[in-house]
Image (tube, rainbow, N blue to C red):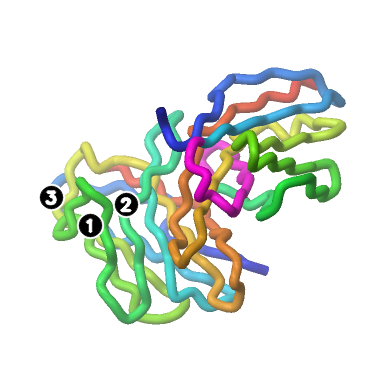
């Protein structure tokens, strides 16, 4: 079992839809959770950073963490064509290690 | 804030030559920078962790003599691909961790596309 599982998609939704992106992980040592957005041929851009179970909201984006289930989600409300990109979850266990463990990324297409 | 630049954005070189890629944190200091490689439709593969003033730590399977990393200042790390071959063609991305933050997020550069002919 890989440390972080993420469905690669592709996922296609109509404009305005609510998008749900998910990752599951096996190592309970992970304590810090990030979501990155990567446009084609560009570097990843940090969207959300969380470290506790529950929800964190930033504009149209909501990150949700359930440590008991080892499950994290990113919700995008009122999706726009400009949201079309690959979304990567990234996890860190803390304890002085700064390396991130990435999911494979989910490719999202928002159709106008 | 938290802007990371990379130069060049794209480079084409002949087999056997060396290529240097620069990674700069523009508005923060970074004692730790990371170098990744990304193949098409795949996730990021960590190559090495670059620490300012000390030797880089390479991931298993990454040749340290082929991928030379220098992190001479708190805002600059360089990756030199020595004696490049076509199989080294890839998208190379750096990231940096903000020294002023106690959190674990990394900020990524825009990437460098290397093509070796």
Q: Is residue B47 above or below residue A40?
A: below
Q: Can you tell which mark lies on residue A101?
A: none
Badge 2 element: strand
Query: Range of the magenta residues?
Result: A26-42
Q: For the residue carrying disc 1, how many other residues have a C-alpha within 10 Å: few (<14), some (14-19), or many (20+)?
A: many
What percent of the width, then of the height, locates residue A110?
74, 24
Quarter location, residue B55? bottom left
The subunit letter for the residue under badge 3 reads B
Q: Is A38 situated above or below A99?
A: above
Q: Give the foreground label among 1 and 3.
A: 1
In the rendered image, residue B73, in percent from the top left (x then y), is placed at 40, 81
Q: To which residue does mark 2 refer?
A: B47
Residue at the spot of label 3: B16
Residue at mark 1: chain: B
Residue ID at (79%, 49%)? A56
Are the residues under marks 1 and 3 on the same chain? yes
Q: Nearest the camera: B91 or B101? A: B101
In the image, residue B28 above or below residue B96: below
**Quick check: can you spot residue A43?**
no
Circles 2 and 1: CB atoms closer than 8 Å: yes
Q: Nearer the viewer, residue A103 or B8?
A: A103
Q: Secondary structure at mark 1?
A: strand
Q: Is residue A58 left or right of residue A37?
A: right
From the image, tell me which residue sits under label 1. Answer: B67
Residue A39 is one of the magenta-drawn residues: yes
In-image side of B95 versus B58 (left or right): right
- Residue A78 lies in quadrant: top right
State the separation of the CA atoms marked 1 and 3.
13 Å
Q: CA distance from mark 3 to mark 2?
A: 21 Å
Report which quarter residue B53 is drawn in.
bottom left
Q: CA distance from mark 2 to mark 1?
A: 9 Å
């Amino acid at each position: 079992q890989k440390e972080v599982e993420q469905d690669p998609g592709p996922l296609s939704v109509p404009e305005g839809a609510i998008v749900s992106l998910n990752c599951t992980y096996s190592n309970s040592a992970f304590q810090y959770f990030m979501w990155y957005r990567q446009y084609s041929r560009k570097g990843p851009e940090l969207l959300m950073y969380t470290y506790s179970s529950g929800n964190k909201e930033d504009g149209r984006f909501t990150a949700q963490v359930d440590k008991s289930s080892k499950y994290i989600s990113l919700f995008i409300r009122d999706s726009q064509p400009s949201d079309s990109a690959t979304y990567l979850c990234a996890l860190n266990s803390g304890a002085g290690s700064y390396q991130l463990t990435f999911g494979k990324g989910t490719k999202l297409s928002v159709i106008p | 804030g938290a802007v990371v630049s990379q130069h060049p954005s794209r480079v084409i070189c002949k087999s056997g030559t060396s290529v240097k890629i620069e990674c700069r944190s523009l508005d923060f200091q970074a004692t730790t920078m990371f170098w990744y490689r990304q193949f098409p439709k795949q996730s990021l593969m960590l190559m090495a962790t670059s620490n300012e003033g000390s030797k880089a730590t390479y991931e298993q399977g990454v040749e340290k003599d082929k991928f030379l990393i220098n992190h001479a200042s708190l805002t600059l790390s360089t990756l030199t691909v020595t004696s490049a071959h076509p199989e080294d063609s890839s998208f190379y991305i750096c990231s940096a961790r903000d020294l002023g933050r106690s959190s674990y997020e990394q900020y990524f550069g825009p990437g460098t596309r290397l093509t070796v002919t």
